[in-house]
Image (spheres, rainbow, N blue to C red):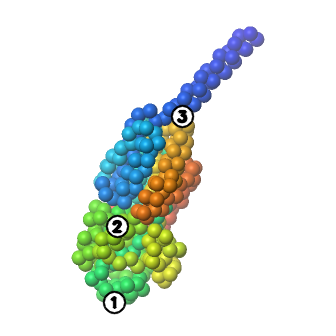
Amino acid sequence: MTKSIGRRTALAGLMGVGIAQRAVARDTFPSQRVTLVVPFPPGASTDVTMRVMADKLAQMWGQPVIVDNKGGGNGIIAAEAVKNAKPDGYTLLATSSMTHAGNPVLYDKLSYDPIADFEPVTRMSLVPMCVLVTKKLGVKTLAELTARLKAEPGKHNFGSGAISARVAGELYRMLAGIDAVSVSYKNNQLAAPDLNNGIISFMICDAGSAKMILTSGWADALAVTQAEPYPQLPGVPSAVQAGMPDLLFTTWSAFYAPKGTPRDVVMKLNKDIIAAGTSPETAAKLDAMAGGPSFTTPEGLMAFTKSEIEAWRKVVRAANIKIE
């Protein structure tokens, strides 16, 4: 009996030490540099918003927070890097719907599993797409664009600067019943000059990229791909207002940690990222960039990721989109 009590006491002591160690880890995290791996080049909309977040987090934590741009491979390079990183919370994937909703549907074989290989931390934004048209075409509404494209089948191209842009463009093509060809670009910013010059007739991109392009005066905005107008793009009609109520498609950004990252660390990251993103100064910056702040619990992001994979699958299969 005495030995049994001693073992229980020792076990309780060890458990207490474990709990105390986890509490200390939670309270002291982060104690060194944190890296946000972004699967886009500098200047892309996700990169810009993540740099705003990095600055605020560095201020909160008193530790460096760097953005590591690992573009290329449709986000696969960045996702693999974080998948294989030490699961301690110091390396995070700061990504978009491309890596965790698009790639799982577009690739028959993928070197990572968006569900099994990552710990969801929080969604950061939920943003509609925006239909942009070259000023050289002389159309002012989505109905006018559709009519013009129908009248001139096969004569017009649309730009795709990201997988989300390609999928949204194909969705519009199917709904409108038009014959237009997708032209691929490395990012939306590289597509913008060709839109300005009329080499491509239209493109559909995230609202953040659209806002930058519209500021340049290179295009007109015809609709956002959600049922309600988007406050960050005032004056641009919703899909419903533009007469195409089924043109609904959103892009998003989120934070994921490597699988096996301790729960306490994940929850600390979730709490601090939300605090950073909802602080008045950061929220104002994100709003100015049409960032669409929209945070979740880790469980909320997991459920959302699964639902988005199925939403993408529906469009990709219907449009028979293939990775070239």
Q: Position of residue 56 (x, y in %)?
A: 43, 47
The three-letter code of the residue at mark 1 reads: Ala
Is residue 217 visible to us here? yes
Viewer-proximal residue among 244 and 109: 244
The three-letter code of the residue at mark 2 reads: Met
Q: CA distance from mark 3 to mark 1?
A: 62 Å
* Residue for badge 2: 212
Q: Residues within 10 Å of mark 1 (few under 14, many from 20)?
A: few
Which quarter of the rendered picture does the C terminus lie within? bottom left
The three-letter code of the residue at mark 3 reads: Arg
Label 2's element? helix
Q: Is 108 positioned to the left or the right of 18 in the image?
A: left
Name the residue rendered at 45%, 74% in the picture: 234
* Residue for badge 1: 151
Name the residue rendered at 49%, 76% in the picture: 238
Q: In this rendering, which labeled residue sits more in front, label 1 or label 2?
A: 2
Q: CA distance from mark 1 to mark 2?
A: 30 Å
In primary-sequence order, the first of circles 3 and 2 is 3
Q: Is residue 176 above or below residue 92?
A: below
* Residue for badge 3: 26
Is residue 244 visible to us here? no
Viewer-proximal residue among 76 and 241: 241
In primary-sequence order, the first of circles 3 and 1 is 3
Q: Position of residue 257 (x, y in %)?
A: 46, 43
